[in-house]
Image (cartoon, helix red, strand yellow):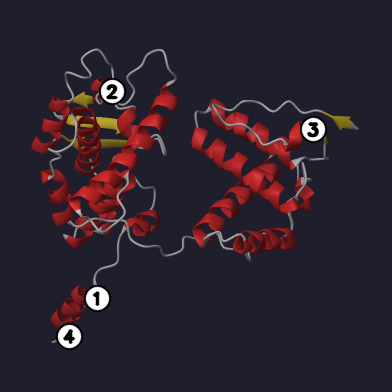
Amino acid sequence: MKVTLKVPHISGIFFKHKNGHAFIRKKNSLRTHVIRLSEELKAENRIRTARAYIGTLNCVLRFTDTDDISLGEISENFVKDLETFLKMRGCRLNTISFYMRNLRAIYNKAIDKELLHAPEKNPFLKVFTGNAQTSKRALSKSEITLIKNWKNDEADKRSKDALLHAKLYFLFSFYTRGMSFIDMAYLKKEDVNNNVICYARKKTGQTIHVQITPDLKKIIRFFEQETSDSIYLLPIITKPDKPERTQYESALRTYNNNLKKIRSMTGINKALTGYVARHSWATIAKYMQVPIEQISESLGHSNIKTTMIYLAAFDQSILHRVNMKVTV
């Protein structure tokens, strides 16, 4: 029976509906299942995961060139062919892993909801769902200092202010052990007590405590006038009449664009994004021989494996010197 499915609006996320036409509802429809999961995630304020599921669904439907498939069609061969399809489109391993992990989660949730029977063999066993080694995103301590000391005297005031904000946000993240931009955006003044910032990570819900250092205090004081009428510590979410999520996302794009300009102006020969501050803190701590367990806890990771992804490999010259100490 042909029916039209009204696709919900998920906090700015629109489902791709081919040509606006009605489609045939499949038994145990992947489309319906993903939309329901996305609505559940939206209710839990897990917007990023909702988007990831919708993006994965769109990826699968591009591969099948259909409006929908049944959950039962997801087999070992189907998943392997999807992986091949993504490789032929030039997707990198980590992009492929992103889609595969999300599809696996969607599939497993269908089993949990008894939309599917658990198969004898996991269909995702032979596809890549790990983390491929990528170019490292960490800055050295001297490069962090370069950003700290950088001044943009030649720019006009508006540009100068925007770039100065980006610089201070980056340093704020670094000084707070790699606080993510979304946590910075929603950080409230009431989260600061007795010279300590206490907040719950949006990503994991884990509570983090960060002592306010002199450098961090200077940044907070710099923004005091801009945030005098706000509940938030930083001037990222500033307009009461606009959705906070929209303001955060717009500010994040502006932030990363301005970091690219700072990278060019400082001559840093590495990618510079908001996440680099987090990677840099972890890597510098590693070079200072801080135990991995302490770095992991400082970053708010649930396990050390996640922390290891953040850490840049030691230079070979350092490893050679270590070997000399051990063996000579």
* Residue at figure coordinates x 44%, y 20% from the top left: 243
Name the element at disc 4.
Answer: helix
Q: Which residue is mark 1?
A: 316
Is residue 85 depicted above or below 183 in this figure?
A: below
Name the element at disc 1.
Answer: helix
Mark before the other along the chain sequence, 2 or 4: 2
Q: Which residue is mark 2?
A: 188
Mark before the other along the chain sequence, 4 or 3: 3
Q: Position of residue 8 (x, y in %)?
A: 66, 26
Q: Are marks 4 and 3 in contact (CB under 8 Å)?
A: no
Q: In this rendering, does residue 178 appear at all? A: no
Q: Are marks 2 and 1 in contact (CB under 8 Å)?
A: no
**Nearest to the observer: residue 1 or residue 190:** 1
C-alpha gap between disc 2 and disc 1: 43 Å
In the picture, the disc for residue 327 is: 4
Is residue 2 depicted above or below 292 in this figure?
A: above
Between disc 1 and disc 3, the foreground one is 3
Between disc 2 and disc 4, the foreground one is 2
C-alpha gap between disc 2 and disc 3: 46 Å
Callout 2 amino acid: Lys
Q: Are marks 2 and 4 in contact (CB under 8 Å)?
A: no
